[in-house]
Amino acid sequence: MSIKVIVFDFDGTLIDSNRFKHEAFFEVFPDDEHHAQTVRAVLAYMNEQSRFVILAEVLQRLGMDQGPGLDARVKELARRYNDIVLDGAKNCPEMPGAETMLASLSQRYRLYLSSMTPHEELKDIVRYRNWGGYFEDTYGYPHQKAATIEHIMGREDVGPRQVVVVGDGNSDRQSAEANACFFVPVTPDFNLGDLAHIIEDL
């Protein structure tokens, strides 16, 4: 049974954005060691969660109770975070060979994008980079990765062993495992130019 669908993560897989998105969490809080230590502690164990979940956790560790006040503060900080990272995500370097690889694979497979970047922001970044033509669809937060893959399999009428998930995070691996799909990990030394051969060998 041959591969029909490839589902890509975005940050750290197709664009080199992980560093500045990480640093932006520190920028939205006061510049002191107490806040920085709290942000570091939260990112150490939940860095793949959405910005809303991360910001809420930081605020709760800083002493803010759950409720309307917390929700409003999370939205405010998320807007500031978005202002910092949106331009960066549009203009940061692609991962080496990403666009060439997408242009080639999109001629042979059905490509999808699944990310924890908010949905509308993700679509905006993809449009800005002129990558929309490579993907059948894009799915950002609040879409959850495992559910997204299940949805894509139904939409394409394919089985698990006809789908490959490509990503740099545990959430990508877990979403593939939850759906019994193939997973290709993007490590720091991974060459996207090798992806076609890897998929052909599955």
Image (cartoon, grey):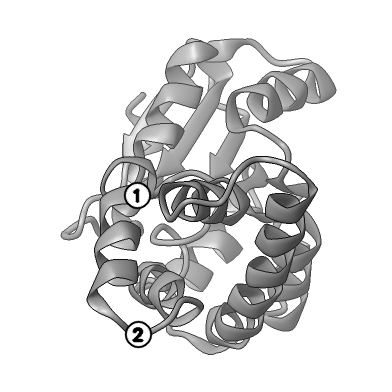
Residue marked by disc 2: 31
Q: Is residue 171 left or right of residue 70?
A: left
Examine the rendered structure and indicate whether residue 60 appears above or below residue 18: above
Relative image position of residue 118 (x, y in whole percent): 70, 56
Which of the 4 image quarters holds residue 125?
Answer: bottom right
Residue to which mark 1 is pinned? 42
Instruction: Say which of 133 and 60 sits in front.
Output: 60
Callout 2 crowding tier (Cα within 10 Å): few <14, some 14–19, many ≥20: few
Question: In this rendering, would 90 be left or right of 120?
Answer: left
Q: Residue at x 42, y 23 (%)?
A: 174
Q: Is residue 79 visible?
A: yes
Q: Name the spot of residue 10 as percent of width and height, x first.
A: 52, 57
Disc 1 crowd, CA 10 A, few/some/many (<14, 14-19, 20+): some
Q: Amino acid at mark 1?
A: Val
Q: Quadrant of the N terminus?
A: top right
| Image x and y of residue 194, in percent | 29, 53
Left or right: 177 in relation to 10:
left
Q: Nearer the viewer, mark 2 or mark 1?
A: 2
Q: Position of residue 144 (x, y in %)?
A: 65, 32
